[in-house]
Image (tube, helix red, strand yellow):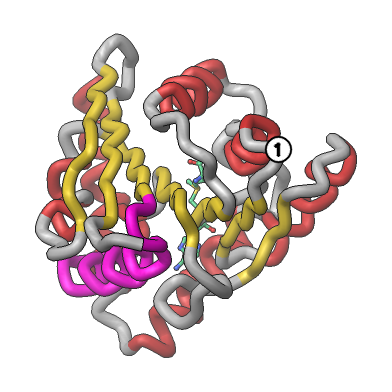
């Protein structure tokens, strides 16, 4: 089973790496079409119901140092399952969820309204082309980077995500371990980021890393 999953992940990464060889314009078109299709039915990754995802969200939130966060971004938020948990955990913060899929964000907004959350908004954009307005003192990037392509595209995406951080802001990257070592490398080597903490969760069928980086500049 484990071998089958690893082989599946390799094919998946290979396909996304190949498509990242397209020009920026066509790569953007591919990602948009791919994730609109993926969201043709609600909750394609079972974020709302899978105990694995719920536990991962709890572990991630537990790794965040207590600070007075004012602006928080969740990049690649899909239907906002985690984003809504963040908005609930930080009720005085302004929370922005970002995703390339308009369809996903329509569901995210509906669920946030149904839950009565008034501190969260959702913005449709491709992180390679556009960015949410302003800077953030907490940025999440979870289960996103393996879709973004080979090393060069990955470096570009990571540098665009890191650029969203306000001075002394925190960036939280959550990806399968040990693949996280490759995926988080651009953050590891970014000049203005230092690693604040890392938690490797191995007591699960799909181990993952929660890596927290801090932006080094003074406010
Ligand atoms: C597996 S989901 C992760 C959802 C959430 N972060 C979590 O961990 O529960 C990955 C999301 O990334 C989004 N995505 C992929 N490429 C993107 C891009 N270039 N810009 C913005 N979002 C993107 C997809 O639409 C998808 O909803």
State which region is magenta.
149-169
Q: Where, quadrant-wise, is the C terminus in this rendering?
A: bottom left
- Residue plotted at (36% across, 86% down): 24
Answer whether residue 1 is visible to the viewer in this image.
no
Residue 19, given in percent of the width and then of the height, sits at 31, 72
Q: Which residue occupies 32% across, 69% down?
A: 157
Check if residue 161 falls in the magenta segment. Answer: yes
Location of residue 35 with respect to 58 vertically, above or below: below
Quadrant of the image occupied by residue 36: bottom right
Q: Secondary structure at mark 1?
A: loop
Residue lying farthest top?
203
Q: Is residue 168 visible?
A: yes
Assign the N terminus to one quadrant of the image: top left
Residue 97, picture quadrant: bottom right
Which residue is nearer to you in this view: 79 or 92? 92
Residue closer to the observer: 85 or 46: 85
**Relative to residue 211, is residue 28 drawn left or right?**
right
Tell me the residue that label 1 is attached to. 91
């Amino acid at each position: 089973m484990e071998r089958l999953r690893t082989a599946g992940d390799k094919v998946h990464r290979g396909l996304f790496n190949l498509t990242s060889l397209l020009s920026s314009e066509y790569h953007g078109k591919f990602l948009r079409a791919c994730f609109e299709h993926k969201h043709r039915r609600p909750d394609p990754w079972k974020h709302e119901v899978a105990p694995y995802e719920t536990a991962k969200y709890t572990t991630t939130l537990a790794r965040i140092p207590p600070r007075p966060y004012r602006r928080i971004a969740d990049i690649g938020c899909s239907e906002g399952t985690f984003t809504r948990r963040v908005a609930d955990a930080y009720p005085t913060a302004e929370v922005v969820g970002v995703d390339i899929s308009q369809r996903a964000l329509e569901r995210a907004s509906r669920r946030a309204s149904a839950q009565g959350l008034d501190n969260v908004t959702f913005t449709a954009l491709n992180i390679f082309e556009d960015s949410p307005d302003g800077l953030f003192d907490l940025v999440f990037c979870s289960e996103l980077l393996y879709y973004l392509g080979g090393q060069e595209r990955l470096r570009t995406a990571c540098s665009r995500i890191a650029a969203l951080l306000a001075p002394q802001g925190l960036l939280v990257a959550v990806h399968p371990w040990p693949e996280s070592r490759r995926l988080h490398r651009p953050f590891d080597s970014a000049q203005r980021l230092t690693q604040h903490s890392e938690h490797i969760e191995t007591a699960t069928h799909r181990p993952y890393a929660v890596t927290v980086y801090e932006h080094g500049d003074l406010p």
